[in-house]
Amino acid sequence: MDINKENNLTEETVSEATQELVSEIEETEVCETVAETEEVSEEETSTLSVNTEDIDEELMRYGISSDEEIQQMPEEISEVPEKKRAIQKPVVIAALAFLLTAVLVFGVYFVYNTFFKKGIDGVWTPADAEVEMMYLVFDEGRVSMKYGNVESYGYYETEEVNGFDVVKTNFYELAQIGGTIVITYPENSDNVTFNFLSDTVDITTLDKDTVDFSTIANLSLDFKKADLPESQIDPANITHASADELGITALNIDEDILGSWRLQLEYVADKYQTYTFNADGTGSYNIDYYEMEGVGMGRIIEFKYTVYDGEILITIDDGSGTNADDSVPYYLDKNNLVMFGIGFEKVN
């Protein structure tokens, strides 16, 4: 007996049996997979099965008729935006908290500086004056000195230097004393002290706690808050000295001089002095603000007037309790009003 032949048969037989067994296993798996697929399909079909009446009722809830054409959903559904990470919420809350804090801080700072912080804005009069006569008015960069109906004005700037509140101005009435003014506030008082310093004083070297301005200031003046009295001019009350001497008691107006008349200043270009005469017997004299030799000033004077025998009788209240009078001879020369021997050009 050929042993090798038997072995060969055995190997062939085993190989055929193995292949047959594998085939049976694969067929079984395929059958099971098909069965599962058919089962799922039946379940999906069963799940998607909806009564037509239910669809009609649902459409009616939203005001849609079953006869209307319904747009189909797009085949491709766009990606749902990724949900913000939870860490963003604390960041937003922190940002809002910071913003609210900044608003509160700014609000407190604004209220304090507007209503509580001491400063020079407003009306001031000498603290030791028995009778209020002179007023200093600081108003957003414009400063004026008023005596009755006579006002001189200029401009100023404020800044903080080395912890001091400093006013710098070239307004003649103040700059002639000292163009740099350090403002100090006496304790337990609403008053302020104006310390007029010369340009030789270096404020950055001063110690706020120990400095004695009485030893370094040109002048130190105490001012107190005041209310600016209203301008009161009664042209019907003739009180001019010359008018009294002449027995003039009634207001007299010359319509030919009504309006404004101006003359250019000899020493400053594009600056004028202007007289204005109103029909009610009031008037004003203005000098435009001008600067010269490092200082500047403008002037506004309100007055009352009456006309008599070729003269304009002007009465000015200078706040002293007595009136300043002026008698000005005048005549008209074409488009000019000649006063003091000088022609003023008609403006309007």
Image (cartoon, rainbow, N blue to C red):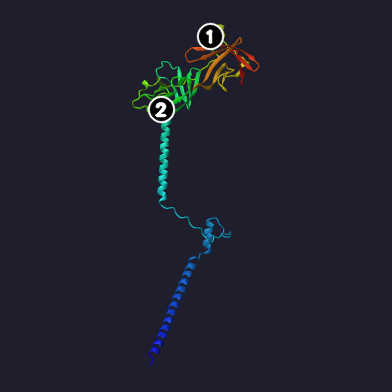
Residue drawn at x 42%, y 36% as measured from the top left: 106
Measured from the top left, where is residue 59 in percent x and y?
53, 58
**In the image shown, does 267 or 310 lie closer to the viewer?**
267
Identified by mark 2, the residue type is: Asp
Q: Quadrant of the C terminus?
A: top right
Residue 138 makes an appearance in the image = yes
Residue bearing mark 2? 165
Q: Which mark is residue 241?
A: 1
* Left or right: residue 60 compared with residue 197: right
Local SS, label 1: helix
Q: Quadrant of residue 227?
A: top left
Q: Quadrant of the N terminus?
A: bottom left
State whether residue 39 is above or below residue 173.
Answer: below
The reply to whether the C-beta atoms of the residues labelled 1 and 2 are less than 8 Å apart is no
Label 2 crowd (10 A; few <14 / some 14-19 / many >=20): some
Local SS, label 2: strand
Tell me which numbered mark, 1 or 2, is placed earlier along the sequence: 2
Measured from the top left, where is residue 169 in percent x and y?
46, 24
Residue drawn at x 41%, y 34% as measured from the top left: 109
Identified by mark 1, the residue type is: Ala
**In the image shown, does 113 or 246 lie closer to the viewer?**
113
* Left or right: residue 195 compared with residue 267: left
Measured from the top left, where is residue 280 in percent x and y?
58, 17
Residue drawn at x 51%, y 64% as measured from the top left: 51
State whether residue 261 is above or below residue 203.
Answer: above
